[in-house]
Image (cartoon, helix red, strand yellow):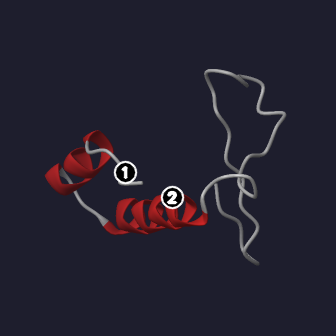
Amino acid sequence: MEFEGGARELYNLEKDPYQLENLAHETDPDFVEALSSRLTQLANCKAAQCRRLENSPVAH
């Protein structure tokens, strides 16, 4: 999750289903940037392009 102003939240939902431990600052910065890029792509995609993005892995 990204907020205006640059704040980010990242959770491991398998280990932390209640989203109590924000991992955004403990995770590889390159991976966090890849996730950020994916969010931007998803915010601007349409139809089949969105489905492809949702189903493709994020490189890290």
Left or right: 3, with 56 as reference point = right
22 up-or-down from 36: above or below: above
Q: Nearer the viewer, residue 19 or 44?
A: 19
Residue at numbered disc 2: 31
Marks 1 and 2 sit apart, C-alpha to C-alpha, by 8 Å
> In which quadrant of the rendered image does the C terminus lie?
bottom left
Q: Of the residues under marks 1 and 2, which one precedes in the sequence?
A: 2
The residue located at (71%, 54%) in the rendering is 24
28 up-or-down from 51: above or below: below
The residue located at (75%, 58%) in the rendering is 25
Q: Count how many numbered circles sit on residues in the image.
A: 2
- Secondary structure category for the residue under label 1: loop
> What kind of residue is marked 1?
Val
> What kind of residue is marked 2?
Phe
Q: Nearer the viewer, residue 38 or 58?
A: 58
* Mark 1 surroundings: few (<14), some (14-19) or many (≥20) residues within 10 A: few
Left or right: 33, with 2 as reference point = left
Residue 9 image point, x, y percent: 72, 52
- Secondary structure category for the residue under label 2: helix
Q: Are marks 1 and 2 in contact (CB under 8 Å)?
A: yes
Left or right: 45, with 17 as reference point = left
Picture quarter containing residue 14? top right
> In which quadrant of the rendered image does the N terminus lie?
bottom right
10 up-or-down from 3: above or below: above
The residue located at (18%, 56%) in the rendering is 49
Residue at numbered disc 1: 58
Residue 38 image point, x, y percent: 41, 61
Residue 13 image point, x, y percent: 63, 27
Residue 37 image point, x, y percent: 44, 68
Seen from this angle, which residue lies furthest right?
Answer: 20
